Amino acid sequence: MAEQIAALPLHWDKKGQVQVLMVTSRDTGRWVMPKGWEMDGKKPWRAAEIEALEEAGAQGYIGSEQIGSYSYDKILDDGTALPCTVRVYPMIVEKLKRRWKERKQRKRRWFTPSAAAKRVHEPELSALLLGLKAKHKPHKQPIIRDLLKT
């Protein structure tokens, strides 16, 4: 099984509700989190931070502890499916760049956790997103709370 890393970009709107930044995939156009392969010489969360910048233009604070993981089949160029596990690192977004590397290949949009969960295809990712709903107080989760202190 191949391993990938992803950033879960978060911010709170004017009403204090948590929101999740999603991007469209380049091949199918469905909504996904910024993700990719680990990078030589980089910690996994730093690689996730780079993916968030390249794919979504998001800058902020990334956590060094994963908030969860999910599995999916990555369809390769030759049509074969490669089973992947994706480790997810939370990121508090401070700024969205107007110009970023993949802006011509992807769309980005903020969603409530429930709306994001409905748009993803992976059940484990959907469950992770639903765990961020307001009643679960995501800012009280230790990993996210520690990020907010930075």
Image (spheres, rainbow, N blue to C red):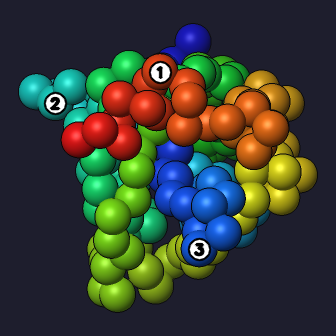
**Residue at 74 percent of width and 59 percent of height:** 112
Q: Residue furthest left?
A: 41
Q: Which mark is residue 65?
A: none
Residue 114 location, x and y as percent? Answer: 84, 51
Above or below — where is 1 with respect to 71? above
Seen in the image, is 131 located left or right of residue 139? right
Task: Name the residue tied to disc 1.
Answer: 142
Estimate the spatial distance between the alpha carbons at disc 1 and disc 3, rounded to whole Å: 23 Å
Q: Which mark is residue 42?
A: 2
Q: How many neighbours does mark 2 have within 10 angstroms: few (below 14), some (14-19), or many (20 or more)?
A: few
In front: 32, or 149? 149
Amino acid type of the residue tagged 2 in the rendering: Lys
Residue 26 location, x and y as percent? Answer: 58, 66
Estimate the spatial distance between the alpha carbons at disc 1 and disc 2, rounded to whole Å: 24 Å
Q: Residue furthest top?
A: 1
Estimate the spatial distance between the alpha carbons at disc 3 and disc 2, rounded to whole Å: 34 Å
Q: How many marks can you see?
A: 3
- Which of the two discs, 1 and 2, labels the residue nearer the N terminus? 2
Task: Name the residue tied to disc 3.
Answer: 14
In front: 18, or 26? 18
Residue 42 location, x and y as percent? Answer: 16, 30
In front: 79, or 35? 35
**Residue at 43 percent of width and 80 percent of height:** 103
**Residue at 71 percent of width and 64 percent of height:** 111
Q: Quadrant of the N terminus?
A: top right
- Which of the two discs, 1 and 3, labels the residue nearer the N terminus? 3
- SS state under label 3: loop
